Each structure stands twice: as C-alpha cells, then as structure tokens.
C-alpha cells in the first residue's frame, strides 16, 4: 500500500471515530463498542504480556497475576495508614463552629 493511501486511510479513520465518539458521548455502550472496534477484539481471545514480577519471579498465568494484584491492593491501605505520622491536633480544630 502506498504512503499516500495509508495517510488517507489513517485520516479517514480518525475523522470517522472522532465523529462516532462525538455523536455517542452520552451512550457508554456505544462508546465501548467503538473502543472494541478500534482495538479489534472481535474473534480473538484477549491476552496480555507477562510483565509483572513479584519478588524476582515473573508471573506467567492469570491466576497468579490476579493473586498478586489482590495481595497488593489489600495491603495498600494498611501500609499507607502506617506511613502517616499521627498529628497532635484534634479533629475539632478542622470543624467550623456551629451557630
């Protein structure tokens, strides 16, 4: 395919999807349908590359990846709470006085 034809096709796609998403800005179902068209998910199984490493081990399957994310997000709250220094002010200092 020539450069000029590729350029025209790319410009046409951009214009088409720009118009598509502008017309369906309030229709989330139609917007997802457009996103699926762009990334071409029809007729193929979604997969992802293994790029996650935990403790030096590369995670190769979806179950171990899901477990690693679960472990991280269930520990994130307590880890953040422990990293915050306790204040010496009362919560009442931040509340407006009632009339």
Image: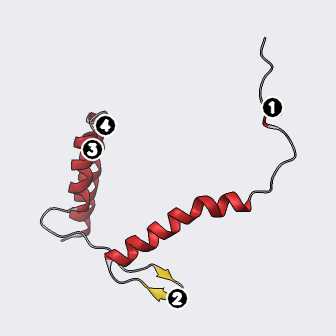
Provide the residue designation for mark 1.
92
Of labels 1 and 2, earlier in sequence is: 2
**Residue 94 location (% of width, % of height):** 79, 32
Looking at the rendered image, the disc whose residue lies closer to the viewer, 1 or 2, is 1
Q: Is 99 rendered above or below residue 31?
A: above
Whole-angstrom CA distance, mark 1 to mark 3, is 46 Å
Looking at the rendered image, the disc whose residue lies closer to the viewer, 2 or 4, is 2
Q: Report the residue that reaches farthest toward the left.
A: 43
The quarter holding residue 81 reads bottom right
Looking at the rendered image, the disc whose residue lies closer to the viewer, 4 or 3, is 3
Whole-angstrom CA distance, mark 4 to mark 1, is 48 Å
Q: Residue at horizontal 38%, vertical 70%? A: 66
**Residue 39 location (% of width, % of height):** 26, 61
Provide the residue designation for mark 4.
22
* 57 sits left or right of 18 in the view: right
* 58 sits left or right of 25 in the view: right
Which structural element holds mark 1?
A: helix
Is residue 13 or residue 68 the one in the foreground?
Answer: 68
Task: Sort mark 1 into few (<14), some (14-19) or many (20+) by Cα contacts within 10 Å.
Answer: few
Of labels 3 and 2, earlier in sequence is: 3
Q: Residue at horizontal 32%, vertical 75%? A: 62
């Amino acid at each position: 395919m020539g450069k000029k034809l590729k350029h025209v096709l790319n410009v046409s796609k951009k214009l088409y999807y720009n118009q598509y998403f502008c017309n369906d800005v309030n229709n989330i179902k139609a917007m997802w349908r457009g996103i699926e068209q762009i990334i071409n998910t029809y007729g193929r199984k979604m997969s992802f590359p293994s790029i996650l490493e935990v403790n030096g081990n590369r995670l190769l399957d979806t179950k171990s990846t899901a477990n690693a994310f679960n472990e991280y997000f269930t520990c994130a709250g307590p880890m953040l709470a422990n990293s915050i220094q306790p204040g010496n002010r009362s919560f009442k200092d931040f509340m407006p006085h009632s009339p």
